[in-house]
Image (cartoon, rainbow, N blue to C red):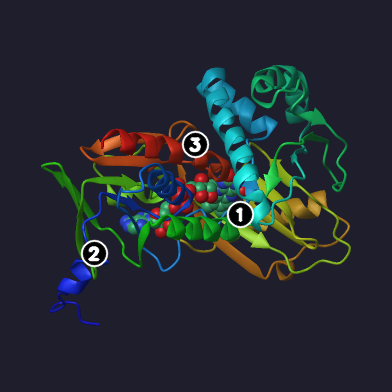
Amino acid sequence: MDQSNFRTSYWEQTTFLRSPDVVVVGAGLTGLQAALALKRSQPKCDVLVIERAPIPRGASTRNAGFACFGGPTELLADMDAYGAESTLKTVRERYAGIRALEENYAGRGIDWAKNGGYEVIDEAPVAEMVWARLPELNALLAEVTGVGETWRHQATPYLYGSTLACFHNPFEAQLHPGKLVSLLLADCHRAGVRFLFGCEVDHLGAAAGAVTLEGAGWGSIVAKQALVTVNAFARKLLPADFPEAIRPVRNQILLSKPLPDFKLRGCYHYHEGYVYFRNVGEDRLLIGGARHRAGASSETAAFGPNGVPEAYLLEKLNQWLPSRQWTDEDFPVRWSGIIAQGDGKSPVLRYASEGVLVAGRLAGMGVALSAALARRAADEVIEQF
Ligand SMILES: Cc1cc2nc3c(=O)[nH]c(=O)nc-3n(C[C@H](O)[C@H](O)[C@H](O)COP(=O)(O)OP(=O)(O)OC[C@H]3O[C@@H](n4cnc5c(N)ncnc54)[C@H](O)[C@@H]3O)c2cc1C
């Protein structure tokens, strides 16, 4: 359609495109939960969510569906890199997010299964390191989970081949991310949150107590405040504010066809969370990640396949589950998703300019973490009213 002579009608301007109090940009887990919290707390506040795609098209509907707080190798690496206090803070929020998901959504058809989390280790020095530091890690986590041994060694119930050690925690769960996002959308609609789908925000400017959002093909909207929850895509929308702090990184996911006699259950972490796998339903295996093998080719905000990590994932499966020869044909369903990396594991919540609050950078574990970030973002917006 030629847009050059297009004008929005008065009817559109006074309904779909009318000025809201708050615009939330991005309908992922963070944006939807923030919009819901905002609307439930301030029913009179007019909240509009603007999403670039016909359905949410970020990480929230394209992830692996782990409701998790992290495996030993990742948490120990985080403790070394960012300190115990910072790691504890993030784990506390992830753990609270798992509890919140369980309380609010587990019983509402999101395929919630609390089979626990596992970490698989197949290198002797790594196994030794985790054995040596497990008491230190568990002492830290005890404050969050309330048990002395959050992670404990458990002989791998389903894996063999060259796995050396396997650790388990009973707190992590799995879910169907698409069903969770659908439920959040339904809850938002019920609460009176408005939506515009298929409207990419190309430009966002704040002046004189108002924020103007513009996009090709749909026009513009003025709001009192904007909450930007575009996560990995923040650098594109706000290049001046986030030159380096939010970095898009592509992850690959492979989902198997139904497999006979498939028994693996639970959420499995490997190598600081770079690789992850789980059962989907009774008879499918999902495996994803391996961006550490992809190098610069994974540093992109563009969706698409990548043969290098995909081949590595198959290689690892053949090592861990050698009862069958895993081939490309076993994985007819594949997709990619974009995560937001940066310096540090805690999410960003800060003003890019007056009236423009950014909440994002949830890295590879935002399913549980997004609840706390959304809550804090909503509280911050409410405070400005
Ligand atoms: C392959 C993969 C596997 C993962 N696995 C897990 C897992 O198992 N467990 C876990 O906890 N976490 C996992 N994650 C991370 C988790 O999915 C994210 O941290 C979380 O979904 C982030 O949610 P969000 O709402 O902040 O961002 P997103 O879900 O990315 O949402 C951002 C939204 O903004 C929209 N948008 C972007 N730009 C614009 C614009 N200019 N205008 C309008 N709209 C815009 C996008 O279309 C999108 O819908 C995974 C991520 C990936 C990619």
Residue type pointed to by label 2 = Leu
Q: Residues within 10 Å of mark 2 (few under 14, many from 20)?
A: many
Q: How far across and how far down the image is residue 134, in percent?
A: 74, 22
Q: How far across and how far down the image is residue 14, in percent?
A: 20, 66
Residue type pointed to by label 3 = Ala
Residue, disc 2? 17
Circle 3 — which element?
helix
Q: Residue at coordinates 54% horizontally, 18% vertically from top-left?
A: 85
The reply, left or right, for residue 340 in relation to residue 160 is: left
Q: Residue at coordinates 19% horizontally, 61% vertically from top-left?
A: 220
The reply, left or right, for residue 357 in relation to residue 40 is: left
Quadrant of the frame with the N terminus: bottom left
Q: Which mark identifies residue 372?
A: 3
Which picture quadrant has residue 347?
Answer: top left
Residue, disc 1? 309
In-front residue for pair 213/376: 376
Q: Residue at coordinates 57% horizontally, 38% vertically from top-left?
A: 97
Q: How far across and how far down the image is residue 377, in percent?
A: 38, 38
The answer to whether residue 65 shows anywhere in this view is yes
Residue type pointed to by label 1 = Pro
